[in-house]
Image (cartoon, helix red, strand yellow):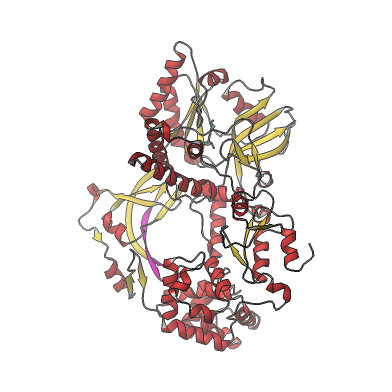
Amino acid sequence: MSSNKEAFLRLKQLIAHHDDLYYKQANPEIDDQAYDRLKSELEALLEKHPEFKDAQTTLSLVGDDRIDGFQSFKHRLPMLSLDNTYNKDDFFTFAQRLETQFSKETFQLTIEPKIDGVAVSITYESGVMTRALTRGNGTEGDDITQNVRLIQDLPHTIPQSSGFMEIRGEIYMRHDEFERINAIRKENGQDTYKNPRNLAAGTIKLLDFEEAQKRSLNIVTYGIGAFEPSSLFSTQQSIQEKLKDWGLPVLEKFWIAKDAEEAWTAIETLDQMRNRFTYPTDGAVIKVNDFSQQRRLGSTAKAPRYAIAYKFEAEKAETRLKDIQLQIGRTGAITPVAILEPVQLAGTTVSRATLHNEDEIKRKDIRIGDTVVVQKAGEIIPQILSVNLDKRKADAQVFCFSDHLKSLNIEAQRDSDGATWRITAKDDPIRRQRALMHFASRPAMDIENLGTAVIEQLIQIFAIKDPSDLYSLSKNDFLKLEKFKEKSANNLYQSIQSSKSQDLWRLIHGIGIPNVGKQAAKDLESEFQSLDRLQSASYSELIQIDGIGATMAESIRTWFDDTDNQFMLTQFKEQGLNMEAIKIESEEAQTLANKTFVITGKFESMTRDQAGALIEQYGGKVSSSVSAKTDYLVAGESAGSKLDKAQKLGVTIISDQELTQLIGGVS
Ligand code: IVH
């Protein structure tokens, strides 16, 4: 294969990877600009080698957000993407092209905010909302009507309209709502979302309707797809006006310009004021106003020629780095955090920024007292871009990680495989506190009434070292805690005692083996069935398990080889904690033993989580991907690629009713 072809395939694969993260998982790793660079590289290669192009490549140029569990439908008019530009010259080249095309004809441009949300197309028929679709692959999108109906400011009927139309807009999440949900997720030990866009994308695709009802999304509409009668709109401006008349949420501001210069002024004004909008705005969209002119310019497979997006630079600000503090995680990992002189950035006051690790501080030569440039790009947590060396004072202090640790009396070591420092002393009070908080948290042992303040006191008063000490405390001990009376002491005692019978996976998760999260704990429980067996599993046994990689396997081995940890487990055993997978000793339960299931699609009788819990309860194993080892695929409505793969591999495909029958229930 030629090296060009190889580069092309690699690039295509890389873009597919980032597409998956952005569109399907709502969890991108790179920012829009870096992503656009990859795409331009791919397009440049294709221009030189048109022979590389195939149907799949066209798909990877537009992205695809469709996922399992949703039914997809065709858009009447495709939902295209926009070409992005990042500098003034590129914008003027676009405008120049229009001038050449229209030669002596006049034309107007509209300038609109580019909302950083999730694209949606909502169909209204005879004034009634009938369906909402995601962009999907541009031609066909996922049906998200159920969740879109929950958006408060979107009318379900438009009495004044009688025809057919696909209204196009952007779903977004307000900042306060983003913070509210992330705070809850953090408390529950779940991963938090990096920015409101990702959380909006994750929310609109929630299959769990109960959870979707607890979150609040907003929408702003700005365009139209197919519409009848065809006389309804003739300009972009008329769309904005009609949408507003009909009571739909619209753009707070939009401009009409008669030439490129005027348009540029509007773009700059928009950049200045965008922080005050309720929706996140990351650029301007410039469109030819007149529809007949738009039609003459036409579109490519990916984007219209009559419009372009101008992406604003991520906002930056200079401020003083007052201090560097260290944060400690549940496994003792130490992360440096920059403490800043508060500064306004992208609509919020920023007083902290992440510094990632020791190497990052060294690489950027960041010193305490420096004037630093902070940037808020796609991420909500700001980053330090660089130091303004012109403003460096003589007394700026180099931050020495190891000295700082020493001054705080923290014993730590750098991980052998990375740049992370980790506390080595097991009895470090902060580390103990983090470990106990994790043990008691909802996704682990779920011990009610055992919050941060109580844990802090338990460490102080009773010198609690590890979670096993919790079980030797008496009701009377709890009376020594601040504000604790007979009833509260009793409640706390009861919740600690009753946690002894929690499921084994909760204990595996709770003991805090680095890199082992909730899913891995469940996988380990279903593989080994008892803590004893897990404890004696070898590295090679561990890496053979689906979902357990080399890092995790090593981390599990290291954890169990540690004598303090072994001692804690002995304590747990003596205290009577459940260390076995709970088996249902019925004949039916044996039916699912050693059987691996994959669940896909949407069911009427249960959610996917419930189906998974049922399978696990009856001794079966749930895996996330279909392979030759899969025994059953439980497939519901709109099952996608997993169903195809299962059919190809000859895996038995069953419905939710058949699953209920398998475990001996009545469907
Ligand atoms: S017009 C054919 N206007 O940006 C052009 N799009 O990067 C259709 N977007 O898919 C889009 N604000 O999801 C248009 N004022 C605006 C927009 C906007 C945000 C999104 C939209 C589009 C994407 C393209």
Could you tell me which quadrant the N terminus lies in?
top left
Q: Is residue 151 above or below residue 370?
A: above
Q: Position of residue 421 (x, y in %)?
A: 34, 68
Was residue 206 drawn as part of the magenta stretch in this picture?
no
Q: Does residue 638 appear left or right of residue 555 in this picture?
A: right
The picture quadrant where one finds residue 557 is bottom left
In front of the other: 136 or 159: 136
Residue 333 showing in the rendered view: yes
Was residue 335 drawn as part of the magenta stretch in this picture?
yes
Q: Is residue 342 above or below residue 225?
A: below
Q: Position of residue 618 (x, y in %)?
A: 68, 71
Q: Which residues are magenta?
A: 327-342
Q: How many marks?
A: 0
Name the dominant secondary structure of the magenta segment: strand
Q: Position of residue 439 (x, y in %)?
A: 53, 74
Q: Position of residue 70 (x, y in %)?
A: 64, 47
Q: Does residue 347 appear left or right of residue 210 in this picture?
A: left
Residue 314 showing in the rendered view: no
The picture quadrant where one finds residue 414 is bottom left
